[in-house]
């Protein structure tokens, strides 16, 4: 999709910051770069040609956008998910939204493989026993020949499926629309009932919110393990805690939560068989530089009047795939 | 290699037991199955046609073998390693020794992948922080594009290399004899100096004993991580502990130790950056059944006068590979 750059003058690039700042050195002199924190966003929004949402944990855009006055024609978020950004007014506007599609695929796929293998090989128990200086041999599980169901057929879900497949795990991919190599929602319960590994990697949308609820954990096998690297709100967290306590499923790993950071008094920290990690699955050394470089590349396309990739379907809440 | 079965009568199969017993049901009536513990072994050895060393943690064969009288013509061990078994008298004898080649390849390869990914994704620290209910985001490492050096070019080492390669880790294999796809010992130090991951999966022989010593840990990169799934004696354990304490290398995981079980007062339990597991890398659910079935298959070949596979080169201490 092409978004026309302003006809004359230096464009204003507004950056909703996080610490550390993005590296946009190549844009010096080619854009008026203004930085803003959350409280300053609403005031600066009308003057911006482009908004870079570098602080992808912030919900400030959703709150500031609905005000009056002009709005940037292009918004880029340094994240794969769009849920922190999209408000009805932005969806209805003709502003184009792009995301960081691609940066997180391989890191998250590896992270999921790490969790799956760690659970199969009982590594959490190994660490516990090491603390106690206890030598206790156990049998572990082979992952080759097991079955996985990956929910979410975007680039992250597809990268996860590829990685699990090379480990000889029979892997089914589930998306919103059935197509070659992708099952539709109608197949989900049947696939869940057979899976050894259920991986949630879907975007947060009206359709996916709370999709992993008590009923779905009930459908899974008692030996199944559940992993969420999508968004916390895909999961009814109380239902998962109960499913683990009642041994409806054998274990789980959550990298994302409805409330982040996970509050210190959350019962999830100590739910039996649950691995808690702090939303880090996609964040490998150098990731911020990659995110910055990706935005610079998109900016240069925009400057040159060329079409932008990674354009989000704002109604669906993600970049439509292949 | 063919080992002649006794010309007449039911052969005597002596089993050096561990708990649980092997499942040899199909051999009932076709072999006189005698069970022995360690103290009884020396007395029974002269009457046995075949010895099955089911308790592969025992060193009793090495001690009982040198005595006088006839010896079984065939010894099978339910393990990949031979170091618990081979004494000079057995090596010099014409007794054929076979091992459990093949059973452990895939499980150990997966276990190594689990450790490599767990270290890359900082999972041990994640577990520690979870105990403290502490949300602390960290950047982790991508494994794709890193380099591994796998020492040991038998079926286990080759399975490890295959698995690391499918994770897009550039992997070099080092064996005793250079050949296509396998580096010789002359290349070892150069490969160690570049590796992000060093995996020890060699048999314990005179050549490999203590090969990972202070000098070799000194050659490795400060960011390197070391994994031993071969035999404890491949590693000079004090040197490894020192290399970790001095940050010569970034981390390590040991599944095997010079003394097993690892004594509760060993400093290794708390060495910084060291993962300790209780010699379990190859032992996936059903492994004992697979070991039993493999022996029954070999027994039936022997009974029929057909050649035995998995024959160990007793001088070298392993089954020569391809």
Image: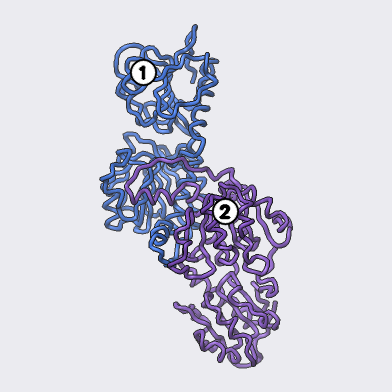
Chain colours: A blue, B purple
Residue B165 to residue B87: above or below: above
Residue B19 to residue A24: above or below: below
Q: Residue at horizontal 35%, vertical 21%?
A: A90
Subunit under mark 2: B
Residue nearest the observer in this picture, B75 or B121: B121
Q: Residue at horizontal 70%, vertical 81%?
A: B92
Q: Quadrant of residue B69?
A: bottom right
* Residue A152 in the image, given as x and y percentages of width and height: 42, 40
Q: What element carries label 1?
A: loop
Residue nearest the observer in this picture, A9 or B130: B130
Mark 1 burial class by Cα count in 10 Å: few <14, some 14-19, many 20+: few
Which residue in the protein does label 2 denote?
B163
Q: Residue at horizontal 39%, vertical 17%?
A: A94
Is residue A93 visible to the viewer in this orientation of the structure? yes
Is residue A322 visible to the viewer in this orientation of the structure? no
* Discs 2, 1: same chain: no
Residue A93 to residue B37: above or below: above
* Residue B127 in the image, given as x and y percentages of width and height: 39, 51
Subunit under mark 1: A
Residue A78, disc: none
Residue A93, disc: 1
Residue nearest the observer in this picture, B170 or A236: B170
* Residue B87 in the image, given as x and y percentages of width and height: 64, 79
Q: Residue at horizontal 66%, vertical 91%?
A: B7
Q: Image check: A269 left or right of B70?
A: left
Q: In which quarter of the image is residue A304?
A: top right
The C terminus of chain B lies in which quarter of the figure? bottom right
Mark 2 burial class by Cα count in 10 Å: few <14, some 14-19, many 20+: many
């Amino acid at each position: 999709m092409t978004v026309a750059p302003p006809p004359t003058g230096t464009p204003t690039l507004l950056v909703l910051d996080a610490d550390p700042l993005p590296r946009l050195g190549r844009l010096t002199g080619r854009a008026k770069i203004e930085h803003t924190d959350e409280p300053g966003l609403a005031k600066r929004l009308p003057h911006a040609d482009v908004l870079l949402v570098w602080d992808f944990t912030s919900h400030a855009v959703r709150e500031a956008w609905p005000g009056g006055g002009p709005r940037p024609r292009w918004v880029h978020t340094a994240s794969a998910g769009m849920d922190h950004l999209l408000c009805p007014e932005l969806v209805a506007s003709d502003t184009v939204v792009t995301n960081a599609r691609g940066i997180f695929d391989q890191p998250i796929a590896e992270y999921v493989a790490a969790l799956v293998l760690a659970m199969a090989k009982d590594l959490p128990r190994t660490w516990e026993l090491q603390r106690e200086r206890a030598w206790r041999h156990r049998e572990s599980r082979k992952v080759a020949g097991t079955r996985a169901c990956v929910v979410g057929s975007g680039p992250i879900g597809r990268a996860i499926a590829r990685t699990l497949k090379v480990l000889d795990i029979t892997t089914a991919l589930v998306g919103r629309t059935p197509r070659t190599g992708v099952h539709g929602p109608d197949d989900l319960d049947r696939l869940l009932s057979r899976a050894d590994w259920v991986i949630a990697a879907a975007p947060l949308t009206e359709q996916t919110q709370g999709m992993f609820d008590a009923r779905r954990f009930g459908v899974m096998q008692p030996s199944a393990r559940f992993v969420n690297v999508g968004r916390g709100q895909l999961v009814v967290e109380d239902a998962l805690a109960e499913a683990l306590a009642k041994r409806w499923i054998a274990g789980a790993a959550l990298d994302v939560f409805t409330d982040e950071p996970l509050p210190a008094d959350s019962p999830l920290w100590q739910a039996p068989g649950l691995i808690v990690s702090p939303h880090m699955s996609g964040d490998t050394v150098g990731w911020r530089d990659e995110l910055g470089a990706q935005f610079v590349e998109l900016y240069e396309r925009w400057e040159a009047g060329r079409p932008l990739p990674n354009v989000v379907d704002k109604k669906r809440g993600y970049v439509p795939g292949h």
